[in-house]
Image (tube, coloured by chain):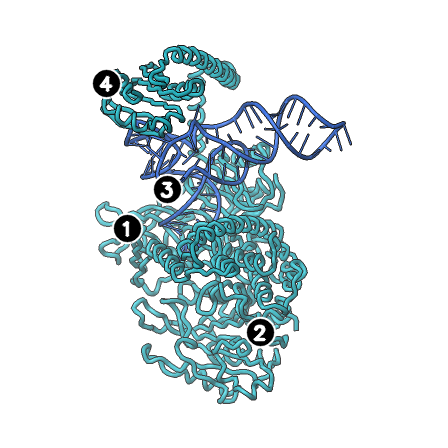
Chain colours: A cyan, B blue
Amino acid sequence: MKSQQVRQQFLDFFASKKHSIVPSSPMVLKNDPTLMFTNAGMVPFKEYFLGQKNATDKRVADTQKCLRVSGKHNDLEEVGKDTYHHTMFEMLGNWSFGDYFKKEAIDWAWELLVDVYKIDKDSLYVSVFEGSKEDGLGYDQEAYDLWKNHISEDRIINGNKKDNFWEMGAQGPCGPCSEIHVDIRSAEEKAKISGKSLVNNDHPQVVEIWNLVFMEFNRKADGSLEKLPAQHVDTGMGFERLCMVLQNVQSNYDTDVFTPLIREVEAITNNDYGKNEDVDISIRVIADHVRAVAFAIADGQLPSNTGAGYVIRRILRRAIRYGFTFLNQKEPFIYKLVGTLSKQMGEYFPELKTQKQLVTNVLKEEENSFLRTLDQGLVLLDGIIKNTKGTEVSGKKAFELFDTYGFPIDLTALILSEKGMTLNENDFNTELEKQKTRSRAAAAVETDDWVVLDEDDLEEEFIGYDTLEAKVKITRYRKVSSKKDGNLFQIVFNMTPFYPEGGGQVGDKGYIEVTNGNVIYIVDTKKENNLIIHFAENLPKDPSQTFRVVVDEKQRSRTACNHTATHLLHQALREILGTHVEQKGSAVHSKNLRFDFSHYAKLTVDQLRDVEDFVNARIDSKIPLEDFRNIPMQTALDKGAMALFGEKYGDTVRAIKFGNSMELCGGTHVQNTSEIWHFKITSESAIAAGVRRIEAITSDATKDFYFETNKVYFELKDLLKNPVNPHKAITDLQEENNTLKKQIENLLKEKAGNLKGDLINEVKLINGVNFLAKKLDLDQNSIKDLAFEIGNQVDNLFLLVGTESEGKAFLTCFISKNLVESNDLDAGKVVRELGKFIQGGGGGQPFFATAGGKYPAGIAEALKESKKYIL
RNA sequence: GGGGAUGUAGCUCAUCUGGCUAGAGCGCUUGACUGGCAGUCAAGAGGUAGUGGGUUCGACUCCCAUCUUCUCCA
C-alpha cells in the first residue's frame, strides 16, 4: 500500500466515525513561548485541553507534520544512525474534546489496524498504565477490560509512569495512556524470543506505533494532580512507522516515504545505499533532514542564527556535514532534492509545491555558506595540529574551533584520528557545559502557578478593535521572574482592549487605573495558548475589584498606520514585482515597519519609487476600512483574501480589506487610509537567498524624517553660501581640495628638501660619526620623515631633533644601523636618558626612537648632552 | 537573550607580547621583451587600519562605547 493511501485511509476511517478532517497546522509555531515547533499531533489543540477555548468540533482527525530535535529518543545526533528515528515526521491523530473516551478510542484503534489495515493481530501488543503510588493513581482497569475484548490477555503489558503516563510538560494536562506495539520480526525470530519481552526496549522491529492518551488530569506547579472538568482523547500514530509495517519492510527508510529521496541522493552523489555503514547513515541523515528543513522553510522559518531558525540551520548543517565527509560532496547538492520531495509530498502539503523555488534557493545559499565555514575551519585546524606537541589536541582549542568558527566537533575528531591524533573530549565537554550554563542562567524564567479568581469566565474577549479602554475584572494572574526583566506579573482580564503581540504587530502598552488616580503600567501584551496576557510591574492590592484599563492611544494609532501600510505595501509589491512575491515575515512597530518577502533580485531605484507611489496613491484615495470579523475561512478566501501559509486551522477568521487589498489579519488598522498621511521606504536589503526586506515609516515618522533631511540640506547649503546648484558646489569643492592637497604636498616636499639640504650641511663629523643635534619647528610626522630621508643620504649618522608643541617637548633620535652595531648605540636608550631633561620618557627601536615630556625649556640641555654618546 | 570571534589596498590576507616610515599575493595602470596570445621583466597608482572616544613619548596593536559580518549556546 502506497503511503498516500495509508494516509488517506486513516482520514477516511475517522471521517466515517463522524470526525472533522482538518489540514495539518504549520510545523513552525509563532505564538507559543514554550515551544518552537509542533512536536506532537496535539500541539495545535493545546488550548482546548488547557480549557482556554472551547472546541467547535468535538471530534477531529488529521495528519500533523511534526519536528523533534531533542527529547528522550530524539537527540538530533542520533537520527540516521538507526532506521526508525526522524527529525520531521507525520503524526496521524484522532481527538475527542470532551466527547468520547477510552472505549471508542480503543475500539476504533483496533478496528482500523486489524480490519482496515489488516495487520495480523498476533503481531500486536498493547500496554496499560499500572498506576503510580507517588501520584496516588491506581491501575487503569478500564483500559485493560476494554482491550480484553480484542486481544488475548497475555498480550497486554503493564506500563509504568515513564512509558504510560503522558504529560504535556512539567505543568499542564496529562493522563494515563495505552500504547499499541507491533512486532514485525520473522516467525523464526519470534519463536526464539517472545515479542513481549522486547516491547519498549528500543528494538527496531518491535516498535510502538500508536499511543492513545486519556487526558483527565491537570498537573499543577507544586506537582499535584487535579481532575480536569472534561475528559479528552489524544492519539498519535507515527505515519512512517505505520507505512513500514504495512509495506512489509524492516525500516522506515525502506518505505516509499523515503525511497525516492534515497534514490535521488544515490544518483546525485554517485553512492549506493546498502553497501557501507557510513554511507548509509549519511544518506538517511540527508533524506531525513532535507524533509525537516524544506517543510520549515515552506512554513516561513528561514535558517538563522537564533531561535527556531538556528535549529533549522543546525539540522541542515548536519546533513551537509555527512555529505561532505562520507559522500564526498564538496559542492551544494541537497537543494537538488527539493524537486523530488515536492513531487512526492506536494499533493497533501501544497506549501511544498508553491514554495519550491524559495526552498531551493535558500538551501543552496545555506549550503554554500556552510561549505565556506568548513573551508575556513580546515585551515584553522591545520594550524592547531601544527602547534600541538604530542598527539592530543586540547579540548579547549577544539571547543574554540567549534564555538567561534562553527567547525563541527565530529569532523575535528575524524580528521585528528586520520592523523593518528586524539582529542581531549572531557575538556571539550566541560567547555560546552560552561557555555550552556551561562546561556541558561541568562534566560532562566521562574513561573508561579496561575491564581484563578474567576473559574466561570475563562474565555477572554478581545474588544480592542472598537475601544481603547474598558472596565474589566482580573480572572487570573501569576508572577514570573527572569534575570532580564526582574519580577513581572502576568494578568488576564475577562475582556481586554489590549492587542497582544501577533501577526507581526507589537503588543499594546497602557495602564490599569487603581485607587485614587494611581496607575499600574502595562508594559507589554502577549498571547500564550490563546490567552491574552498583560505584563505589569505590579499587581493591584485588591485584584478582585473592577478596574478601568486604558491602551496607550498614540502608540496604538501609529502602529495601526504602519500595519495598514504593510498591507498596502504587500499589495504594491505583488502588483509591481509580480505575484511570486509572498510575505515571509513582518514586524509592525509604532515607529516603523519591516516587511520580508520572496523576490529574487534587488529592487531598483525606480521600482522602490513605484512602490512608494503606489502606496501613497492609496493613502490619497482615502480608502475606508472594511472589517470582516468571524467569517468562515472559506468565505474569506472566496471574497479574494490572500491566504498565507502558516495559518492555523481555525473556525473563523478576520479579513481586512482596503480597496483591492484583502488579507486575513487579526491586527489593528486605521479606519481610513488617509490617516496614514504618508509612506516612505527607508531601506531595502537582502536577508537570505531569495528573500528581501523593506523597512519603511509612515505618518508622524515621515514628517520627522523629511524635517530632518530638509534641515541637514539647508544647513549644508548655508555652509556652501547658498549656491544655486549645491551638487556642483560640492564636487567643485572636492576637486579644489584635491588639487590643493597635491600642491601642499609638493610644497612641503620642497620645503623639506631645502630643510634637508640645510641640515645636511650642518652635520659635523665628530669622532668618525656624522653628528647633528638641533631644535626644529616641525610636527612629529615631518620630523620622522626628515630623519629617515637624511638617514638615507648620510652614513654614520647620529641625529637628534628637539621640538616643542602645545607646551610639550619632544625628542626624536635617529642612528644609522651600522653605528648601532659598531658603536653599540641604542636610540631608545638615548631618548630615555635625555628624556629626563624634558621631564618625560620614551622609547623605540635601536635606530629610531622618540620621547616626550612636559618641560620644553629642557630641550636645549638635552641637545647639548647628546654629544656624549659619540665621544 | 548570553558568550566567542571578526572588520587593514578592488579581492584574499600578513603586521608574534604597543615602537622595523602599514606589507605580500592576486587584480589594476603604464612600459619593455616575444610574430599574436599566454607569459616574463620593470615602473606605478591604490589604505582616514569599521566608527567615535580614552590611555601613552608613541596605538592596526591596550581600554570603553557603537556598528558590520561570522559562530556557538539558550
Q: Tag 1, which secondary structure?
A: loop
Residue A666: x %, y % from top left: 47, 51
Q: Chain of mark 2?
A: A
User: What residue would you read off at disc 2?
Assistant: A242
Mark 1 vs mark 3: same chain?
A: yes
Residue kind at label 1, given as amino acid type: Glu
Q: Tell me the kind of residue under disc 4.
A: Gly
Calculate the distance from the C-alpha at mark 2 to the C-alpha at mark 1. Answer: 51 Å
Give how far apart the Cα atoms at labels 4 and 3 are: 71 Å
| Mark sitting on residue A553 | 3
Q: Amino acid at mark 2?
A: Leu
Q: How many residues crowd mark 4 within 10 Å: few (<14), some (14–19), many (20+)?
A: some
Q: Is residue B71 left or right of residue A492?
A: right
Please give the residue where the numbered disc 1 appears in the rendered image. Answer: A537
| For discs 1 and 4, the disc positioned in front in the rendered view | 4
Q: Amino acid at mark 3?
A: Glu
Residue A858's disc number = 4
Query: How many numbered marks appear?
Result: 4
- Dot 2 or dot 1: first in sequence order is 2
Q: CA distance from mark 2 to mark 3?
A: 55 Å
Q: Chain of mark 1?
A: A
Residues at marks 1 and 4 touching, judged by CB atoms closer than 8 Å:
no
The answer to whether dots 4 and 3 both sit on one chain is yes
Q: Nearer the viewer, residue A15 or A143?
A: A143
Q: Earlier in the sequence, mark 4 or mark 3?
A: 3
In the figure, residue A334 lies in which quadrant? bottom right
Q: Nearer the viewer, mark 1 or mark 3?
A: 1
Compared with B59, A239 (above or below) is below
State how far apart marks 1 and 3 are (Cα).
Answer: 20 Å
**Which numbered disc, 4 or 2, marks the residue closer to the eye?**
4
